[in-house]
Amino acid sequence: MQTFERNNMNNCNLKKEIVRKCFSACWGKNGNVTSLELFYDSKVKINAPLQGSLNGVEQLQGFIRGVRLAFPDMDFELVLPLISEDDYVVGYWKGGGTHSGIAMPDFVGGPLPAATNKKVYFSGITIWKFKDNKIIEEITEEGAWTMFEQLDLVKKL
């Protein structure tokens, strides 16, 4: 029993480290989306209110590149300890950036015009599901509404 618990703990710690590196590559200030194949299964399923459903690493890379072009100073960070159990890791994050770049026509909430020069700041929670130490599914609940309010794209509640 003790050996199983130790192996499970080591496996959970490995998954948390993968998430830390992956999150930094995707959303950190100096992120590099070309390395995402190291962390994600090629057929990963991703769902979040802001981006909708994405299928595969290539769609994720394209979405992140678009966000980085719209928000060149974008920077998000994991802010609480990650929680891991079996094949899942859960994390809370926050951050933002200045919308000083391109328009984004494909946000779920509607098109984002070019360069509003408004700052956005929001947080969210992500659940990462693993298989063979690769992320196969990602579910995020982010403060997309807050971002749209800050950009004056929706009425403040």
Image (cartoon, grey):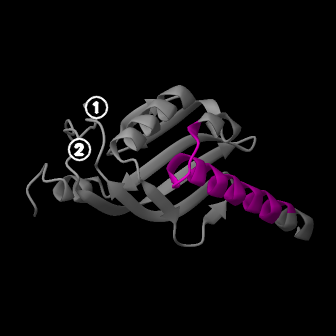
Tag 2 secondary structure: loop
The front one of 101 and 149 is 101
Task: Answer whether residue 98 is magenta in the image.
Answer: no
Give the amino acid type for the residue marked by disc 1 in the picture: Asp
Q: Which residues are magenta?
A: 7-33
Whether pointer 2 and pointer 1 mark residues with C-beta atoms closer than 8 Å, the reply is no
Q: Where does label 1 land, which residue?
A: 106
Q: Counting residues from the N terminus, which is met first, the one under dot 2 or under dot 1?
A: 1
Q: Residue 109: x and y, percent?
A: 22, 41
- Image-quadrant location for residue 50: top left
Image quadrant where one finds the C terminus? bottom left
The front one of 33 and 86 is 33
Foreground tag (2 vs 1):
2
Query: Would residue 106 appear left or right of 40 to someone viewing this image?
Result: left
- Image-quadrant location for residue 19: bottom right
Q: Main secondary structure of the magenta part?
A: helix
Q: Residue 151: x and y, percent?
A: 18, 53
The front one of 99 and 92 is 99
Q: Measuring 65% from the left and 33% from the top, which residue is drawn there?
A: 41
- Image-quadrant location for residue 9: bottom right
Quick one: label 1, few (<14), some, or many (20+) residues within 10 Å? some
Q: CA distance from mark 2 to mark 1?
A: 16 Å
The front one of 115 and 26 is 115
Query: Would residue 151 appear left or right of 84 to someone viewing this image?
Result: left
Give the amino acid type for the residue marked by disc 2 in the picture: Ala
Task: Answer whether residue 30 is magenta in the image.
Answer: yes
Quick one: label 2, few (<14), some, or many (20+) residues within 10 Å? some
Q: Measuring 51% from the left and 63% from the top, which residue is drawn there?
A: 77
Mark number displayed over residue 115: 2
Q: Measuring 43% from the left and 51% from the top, which residue is drawn there?
A: 140
